[in-house]
Image (cartoon, coloured by chain):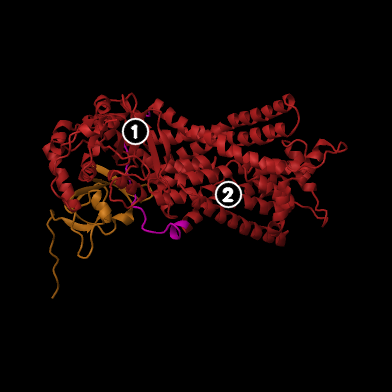
Chain colours: A red, B orange
Amino acid sequence: MSAAVELALRPVKVALVGAPNAGKTTLFNVLTGSSARVGNYPGVTVERREGALRGATREVRVLDLPGTYSVVGETPDEQIVATALAGHLAGEPEIDGIVCVVDATTLRRGLGLVREVLKRGRPTLLVMTMIDEVRARGGKLDPTALSRILGIPVLGVVGHRGVGMDPLHRLLPDPSRWSRAVALPPAETAAQRFAWVDEVCAAIGASELEPDTKTDHIDRVLLHPLFGIAVFAAVMVLVFQSIFAWAVPAMDAIDAGFGELGRLSREVLPPGWATDLWADGVLAGVGAVLVFLPQILILFTFIHLLQDVGYMARAAFVVDRVMGWVGLQGRSFVPLLSCYACAVPGIMAARTIASPRERLATILVAPFMTCSARLPVYTLLIAAFVPSATLFGVVGVQALVMFGLYLLGVATALASAALLSSTLLKGTPSVFYMELPPYRWPTPQLLAKQVWRSARAFVRRAGTIILATSIVLWGLLSFPRAELDPARTPADQARANLEASAAARIGKAIEPMIAPLGFDWKIGVGLVGSLAAREVIVSTLAQIHAVSDEDDSIGLRDALRADVDPRTGRAVFSLPVALSLLVFFVFALQCTSTIVVMARETGSWRWPALALVYTYGLAWLGSFVTYNVALAFA
Amino acid sequence: MQKREIPRPATARAVMPLLALAVGRRARLAEPPPGREIPGRLGDLGFTPGTELRVVRRAPLGDPVEIEIRGYRLCLRLEQLDGLVVEAEPREDGR
């Protein structure tokens, strides 16, 4: 095979380089359609996106590099871009061409980056985005003149409307035929670089743009010292409200659907372990996770919508000072708020945090936020053991305890963030800069695509890793079995089976470790079960207390109250034990999906391992203190 | 002998820390005081001596601030701008 033919068959690889908000990702989405694959670069918390160019006659792989303002290589993002510009990302084919993406409305800053890219001497193409905005603000733009000065092809596009994409589609497959950059005058300092930028801008007749009056007017209200905070609070309450109130009917429907499916399966399939595996392992396990899908759809719709219209950056601007106190950033706020639904989308939403340190800190403290999976556990234990009295005639003690648990979660998250950023993640703080993009109308198709992509990632995880874990845990909870005794009621038989199971052995084995917290081996079994998902402890406790219907929460409540330790004759559950268990659930990272997502998003198992040690250590200590203090007062 | 205050002409440029610059007032970034330099990162963002800039707004809680420089706007935290000195254009009311 001749070299020319081989070259023609090899897929062409081009990489997009540009500042955050330059319109790089929009351009990427338009170029690649739905073919994009999202992942991480090995070992770092940097998102990697690659896709195939749509409608190309030969295979063109488009790599969307992380957004950076500079390619010096100080942050992980910049290091990736710097390595890519040198042509050789580890374990990947060589990059044939660089597409430099610059926001035409901030051309003066963008050209500094273009200069850095051109210095590397690789085939480069310049795409100026948002050219409609420049015209709307009375600016002039002459791609041909700029192309003459730089020597490289220069195109103007409006990414989300597809304007100017045809020439780009024609040029992309042939980086070897792009015209090459002229020799640029040397510039060592920032001042010299910007002097060159000013010269270029003068030569192409780029004038100052008129202020974006529409955006300025809106910002005068939305960033007003007083209204700004009120609007921010209102938006966050709306998000919070939506994930709890609006999602509930759909969640109940999914829950009931899976319950019904399990019941039907038992009717149709012959009794036996295979049916149990299907109904109790597969259906119940996947159902327990898919039940969060409505919340996740609503959440991601909000997050992408706020991002697309331009409010997300404003929210970060408003709240940045408060988050800065604990070493986080304004951008950490929405991901943490999302964790009230489920830590999985929260951790995924942390991708919007540009600086890796703050992103990592946000991911690590996310599991402390009170997710909805803790709610059934809290509700059961509080209803069973906290007196339903009222303080001062108005505040219910039960509600107060519930509120206290939420508060404890947030406080621990913030304190842990402060601790992390002054110890493990210590170092020069990432330079914080962000832009307030102009307000734009959202594009429904783009919004739908983004939400769909996020939801698909979540469901795929439920279908693989979570399914595998629920099967393993089902096995632990089901085998080996007790002998079948016809004299027993089905509920008693279920309890006997559970008592004989591997999980019960684990529960008994860890009893010495959890006894100082007031837990017996039965709670230990519950804790083992809750490793799949927190709320599983409710059904495990129901099984072990031989409550025939696990949805019978009053029955379970009474059974828990009546449970007596045969050795001491004392009640297993008391207020101190219940409080201790509640505190344990506030701290412990008992969620396989969160651990897996954490590993995926940070690109290593080191961080979830650290989180496990830290949260379980904290849980043990917290429960120990709670139990003993409560005993002293009881 | 008593020192007499010399009234400054109304058109004088005031040299002050960037953080003391009032919202909306235009200024030029001054050479940093001896022994200090403008951090490289800020240089990359366009903060070079002589550049005109303006504080567009402060966040509702006072920090960060949005700054207009070289025709674009950036939000930066106060601690990052600490140490930058500007020469403010004379105010329109001449004070």
- What residue occupies the far right of the structure in this picture? A487
* Left or right position of A214 against A521: left
Question: Do circles 2 and 1 both sit on a common chain?
Answer: yes
Residue that protrudes farthest toward the bottom in the picture: B1
- The number of discs equals 2
- Report whether residue A52 is seen: yes
Q: What residue type is labelled 1?
A: Arg
Dot 1 alpha-carbon crowd within 10 angstroms: few under 14, some 14 to 19, many 20 or more: many
Which mark, residue A310?
A: none
Q: Foreground mark, 2 or 1?
A: 1
Between B63 and A55, the one lying in front of the other is A55
> In front here: A67 or A327?
A67
**Magenta highlight range:** A420-442
- Magenta stretch contains residue B30: no
For label 1, the residue is: A61
| Prevailing secondary structure of the magenta residues | loop
Q: Depth check: give the residue in front, B78 or A282.
A: A282
The amino acid on which the numbered mark 2 sits, given as a three-letter code, is: Leu
Residue A1 position, x and y percent, is 29, 30
Residue located at (45% from left, 47% from top): A603
Of all residues, the one furthest to the front in this rendering is A1
- Residue A570 location, quadrant: bottom right
| Quadrant assignment for the N terminus of chain B | bottom left
Q: Give the residue at mark 2.
A: A589
